[in-house]
Amino acid sequence: MPNDDDTFLNSHFAAYRNELIADVTPAGTDAVRMTVRRRRRVAVTAGTALAIALIAGPAAGFAALSRGPAPPAPGTTSEPTISASPSPSASPSPSASATTPAGPDGRITKADLLKAKLTLPAWQSDAPSGCVTKDVRLDAEAKTGRPGLMSLTYGDADGDGTQETIAILGCRPGEAAMQQVVVFDRDAAGKIHTFGQVVRTGIGFDWIITLKIDTPGSIQVQVGDIQPCCDTPASAARKQWRTYTWNGDKFRQSGGPTVFPDKPLTDLRVTATDVVFGADGKASIKVTVRNAGPVDAENVFLWLEMGDSDVDLDGAGWSACKESNLNKEHPPITLECLVGPMRAGETKTLTLGMKKTGTTATASGTARVMRLNINRDPSGDLKESDNGDAFKVTF
C-alpha cells in the first residue's frame, strides 16, 4: 500500500519523473521512445541505440546510499583530498643508509585508536553533518551518522622501514557507508596522529572492500563499483585492485585501473491492459514487465501516466512494489512503483488498483519502465521503443 510520508519515491522519484519525463515523447500509439537527459551528477555516454551507460558516484539517497562526484574520465586518475597531516617519520626511505635510525613504531592497537581524539581527512563532499573530521573519537564500528572503524591492519605504508596503522573507516548515512582508507602513525613522543588519506569512496566507486601491503611504501586497495545494500547482493559489485603509493607528500594511485568501464545495458519491456472504471469509481490494470536481458537490472521503476485525471493508488496489488507513490505535482499525474531487482530473462506481472478522487477526463494513459542503478540513478536501455505501452481509460 502507498506510504506517502516515508517512502523514497515521494522525495526522489518525483524529481526523477519531473526531470526525465519531460524528455519522453511518444513515437506512436504502439511504441514509446524514452530519452533520458544527462543529469548533473551522472556521466552519460550515447550509443547506437541511445545506450545510456551510467557511471555512478553516490549522494545520500534512500537507505542512505551515498552518491558523490562523477568518476574520472578514462585515462585520468582521481585523487582524494588529503587533510593536512604531518610529514612521514624523519627516518629516510629504505634506499638510504642502513645505519640511519628508523622512525617510531606506528603499530596502534584498536583500543588505543578508539581512545584517541583524531583529526580525520575529509569524507566525500555530500557526507551528512554527523560524518565529522575534527576531534573525532571513532566508534568501534561504522554506525549511522558517526565515523567508525571498519577494519585495521599494519604495514610499512610510507616506505620508511617501520610499520604504520592502516584503517578502513566508515560513516553511515543509512544502511550503506561512506568509506575512506586512512594511515595513522605515532610521532617521536608517541602521540597518535593522522598520517594521511589513501583513498575514499565517491570518486568513481562506492565500496572499499579490503586492503593489503605487499611492498613497503605501497598499499593495495580492493574497491567495488557499488556497495552491497538492501536488496543488492555483494555478487552484483564489480571489483578491482588499485595500488596507492606515498610520494613524500600524499598517497597517489600508482597501479591498477583508474575507472570502472560502462556497465552493459539490458532490454526492459512493458505491456499493459486497458483500464475500465466501475460504478464504484475503482479500476485495475494488469502490467507485465520483462527483463529481456542480457544483464540483470539492479532496480526497475514502473510508472503509470494518467494524464490530468484525478486518481489515486488503491488495493493490495501495490504491495508487490518495493515502494509505491502517487505523484500529482505536475501533469501528467503518475502512479509509481519500484518493482525492485530483475534478473535477465525474468518476467513480473502486477495487478494494480486505482480509484477516482476528482475530475476524470483522460481517455488514455501510458505504462513506462526504467532501469535504475544501485544508487537509483537512471540507466539506459538497449531498445527504448518497448519501454512504454499505451492503454485506454474508460470512466
Image (tube, rainbow, N blue to C red):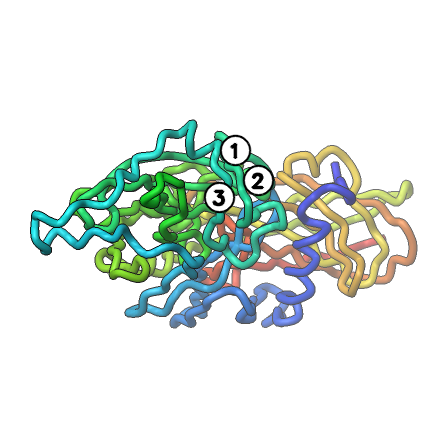
Report the amino acid beneath label 3. Leu
- Give the labeled residue for mark 3: 118
Q: Quadrant of residue 184?
A: top left
In the image, which disc is placed on residue 139? 1
- Residue 53 location, quadrant: bottom left
The residue wearing badge 2 is 146
Mark 1 packing: few (<14 Cα in 10 Å), some, or many (20+)? some
Instruction: Write the residue at 46% across / 55% down.
Output: 202
Closer to the chain start, of discs 2 and 1, is 1
Q: Are marks 2 and 1 in contact (CB under 8 Å)?
A: yes
Who's the residue at 21% across and 42% down the image?
162
SS state under label 3: loop
Viewer-side residue, 1 vs 274: 1
Question: Can see residue 371?
Answer: no
Q: Is residue 242 above or below residue 169?
A: below
Please state the horizontal and vertical placement of residue 378, each as a whole percent of the image.
53, 58
